[in-house]
Amino acid sequence: MTPPETQLPAAPATVTLTIDGRQVTVQKGTNVLEAARAQGTDISYFCYHPGLSSPAVCRQCLVEVAGQPKLVPSCYTPVADNMVVITASERVLTARRQMLEFTLVNHPVDCPICDKAGECTLQKLYMEWDGHPSRSDVNKVHKPKVVDLGPTIVLDAERCILCTRCIRVCDEVAHQHQLTMAFRGDHEILTTAPGQVLDNPYSLNTVDVCPVGALTSKDFRFKMRAWELYTVPSVCPGCATGCNVEIHHAQGQAWRLVPRPNPDINKFWMCDEGRLTYKELTRDRVVGARLGDDPAPLEKAINYAAERIEQVRQEGGTVAVVLGAQATNEDLYLAARVAIDVLSARVFIAGRPAVPDRVDEILRSADVNPNSAGAKIFGRAAAGGIPELERALQNGELSLVWAIGEDLPLSEEAFAALDDIEMIVQASHEDELTAGADVVLPAAMWAEVDGTFTNVQGLVQRIRRALDAPGGAKPHWELTAAIARRLGVSVDEPNVRALFNEMKSKVPEMAGAEWGRPQPLVQLRFANSRG
Amino acid sequence: MAIGVKVVARPSGIAQDMYVSAVVKGLGVTMRHFFENLFGKKHIVTVQYPEERAVYPKRYRGLHRLMTRDDGSVRCVACMCCPTACPAHCITIVAEETGNGAEKRPAIFEIDELRCVVCGLCVEACPCDAIRMDTGIHAPPVEHRGDAVLGKLDLLAHTGKSEAHQGGLGGEWRGAPPVRTG
Ligand code: SF4
Ligand code: SF4
Ligand code: SF4
Ligand code: SF4
Ligand code: FES
């Protein structure tokens, strides 16, 4: 059947309803809970999650709808025109209070040893509107504690309030049925599905969504209390997808990464591998400049690097600049500007080798560099990749290599060829390359700098400085600028913001980029519950 | 508006200029105290330590101590409530797994007694009655700042004057009618 020729554009389907005496217009299909939130009224809930289906099992979100005899779960009730909703009548509040008491009947309330304390929804609701001791006269039902569910997660079955969010994360996000409920009534427990362990690559999202402390991450367990952490919004450096994250840090150290919702990229999730990338921040860091094997003052190492570049140029040799895809757009923009426009150097793009096994249809990319797209833009059409760099090295075409970042996955022959030429590397981690380089300059990593990454979709995303770089490490762009100035190049950007603005005006692909507002440093003590 | 200036007449005169009378007056006070103390010991506040000891008030707190469970293990579960409450930031705790039912305990528990302002907030914050300030032990003088940092074993070794039963009221509170608030 052919569609009618003149089809009217579908009217934007909206619904207008009244919540607590105030009118609100939302899209058709929205549930009452979200509509109330859009209007500024928070309704308590446990089992609902905006990124998951609504099974309406916890009944913590009950509201009154005019004309309906019973209270209805707001997470499960779609809005309808002229609906009249009351979210805070005595009847509603009593029902919710009773539901909360019911949820707490067998709850162990071991908050002092519970990792969720301080960001626990149950704790928050109890403090907000319950606050009385248990009225139960019988012993609590005890369930298993410290149950090993898989490589990443420990379950405390007593604390579980049976909301099924974790089961739904596995089913609906990771598409693997690894968790399930067993037994009935007050003996119901969460457990792994028959023959399964909780080992999917998105397993740690269950810890985030768990509204209580039933699921705890082995990596984070007992390390820090939630309220001691400060949060800084950033982007995961684990792969080209660029999931939005919060860096949770305290005492000058990052303790965990958690996903930050972004509907265009990661929704509410991130992968487990990405979560652990914060460990890179403390692994084998380059903390000071070196000339060969000898530690040197940064100033001296930069002078020496500039002298070598100058000499190679005067002798008519070829300089190669390698743009590492772990660096930010600003770093690479400046390096490419100096390399192409001033030194007429050959430009190559490098980064960590791709991991094809990682790819799935969900979030993970094979490219494990956060800024490959940016490197491609700044390297311009002439830039080669690793194969071209290997060929140039083996043919002896290069006299000096200046690498922004230490990730150069070269073949053994090409690596050997590096020995014969001058090697300057701005590196964050000690590895084979820094061990053999002539000049090593200490570079700061993603959590220690301000800047932007371009993800695989071409979205330019802001990363923010959360920590101090160890030792004398400096952002790549500062190191590059220092060398460039000694080569007589004028680099007058006083800070990375100015560099960003210049990049935005000069590079068409960056025209839509936004630096964003300054973010006040938030301590989780004041950030309410998560999950 | 100009500030009003009150001119105070300077005392003058030959007696004032020579200071002699003031010196004599001052020496007089000194000598009076000297002889009073020599014969009457009226104003002496010095305690002849260690033969004599000052009497401390009944509710004097003294150094902290960490309490133990019946089996002798540390009662603290490293919940971090006391370092959070401490206004002097003098408590440092690193938690670890116990591997038994208690789940969590401090691997490191340090209090810098030089920084402590003896407010007792740590004791009030503790949900487990694991830390008390009832030893009555006066902080000893130390030669190095680090010596005033007491570790877990030091704190566990302190025994105190209070022998109050630990563990709250047990199940007894159930006898009372539930208090409903909110
Ligand atoms: S889940 Fe929440 S209420 Fe339960 S013990 Fe943990 S912090 Fe306390
Ligand atoms: S473990 Fe947490 S998320 Fe899973 S059902 Fe229990 S309370 Fe819900
Ligand atoms: S008494 Fe006050 S200052 Fe001293 S450790 Fe306790 S909370 Fe800190
Ligand atoms: S408040 Fe009590 S249980 Fe918590 S860390 Fe301090 S001493 Fe340990
Ligand atoms: S949130 Fe609506 S029933 Fe659980």
Image: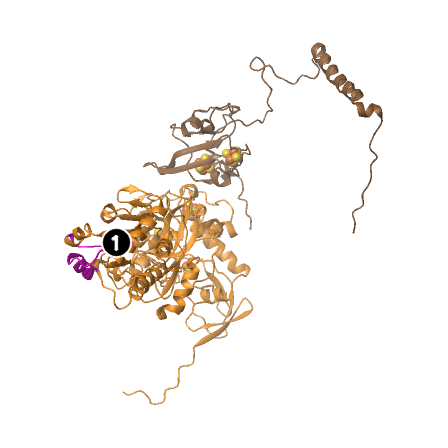
Chain colours: A orange, B brown
Q: Residue flagged by tag 1: what amino acid is it?
A: Asp
- Asked if residue A317 lies in the magenta stretch, the reply is no
In the image, residue A312 sits, relative to residue B157, either above or below, namely below
> Dot 1: what SS?
loop
Query: Which chain does the residue under circle 1 lie in?
Result: A
Please state which of residues A435 and A309 is positioned toward the viewer in this rendering.
A309
Residue that lies at the very extreme toward the front in this rendered image: A314
Residue A236's quadrant in the figure?
A: bottom left
Please state which of residues A71 and A10 is positioned toward the viewer in this rendering.
A10
- Asked if residue A406 lies in the magenta stretch, the reply is yes
Residue at image location 55% in from the left, 48% down from the top: B181
Residue A56's quadrant in the figure?
A: bottom left
In the image, residue B92 sits, relative to residue A261, either above or below, namely above
Residue at image location 25% in from the left, 47% down from the top: A431
Residue that lies at the very extreme toward the top in this rendered image: B39
Q: In which quarter of the image is the C terminus of chain A?
A: bottom left
- Residue A321, horizontal then vertical, whole percent: 27, 58
The quadrant of the rendered image in which ligand 5 is seen is bottom left
Please state which of residues A22 and A174 is positioned toward the viewer in this rendering.
A174
In the figure, is residue A184 to the left or right of A79? left
- Residue A59, horizontal then vertical, whole percent: 43, 59
In the image, residue A103 sits, relative to residue B130, either above or below, namely below
In the figure, is residue B176 to the left or right of A196? right
Residue A9's quadrant in the figure?
A: bottom left
Q: Mark 1 points at which residue?
A: A407
- Residue B28, horizontal then vertical, whole percent: 76, 17
Residue at image location 22% in from the left, 62% down from the top: A385
Residue that lies at the very extreme toward the bottom in this rendered image: A5
Look at the image and give the residue range highlighted in magenta.
Answer: A386-412
In the image, residue A441 sits, relative to residue B40, either above or below, namely below
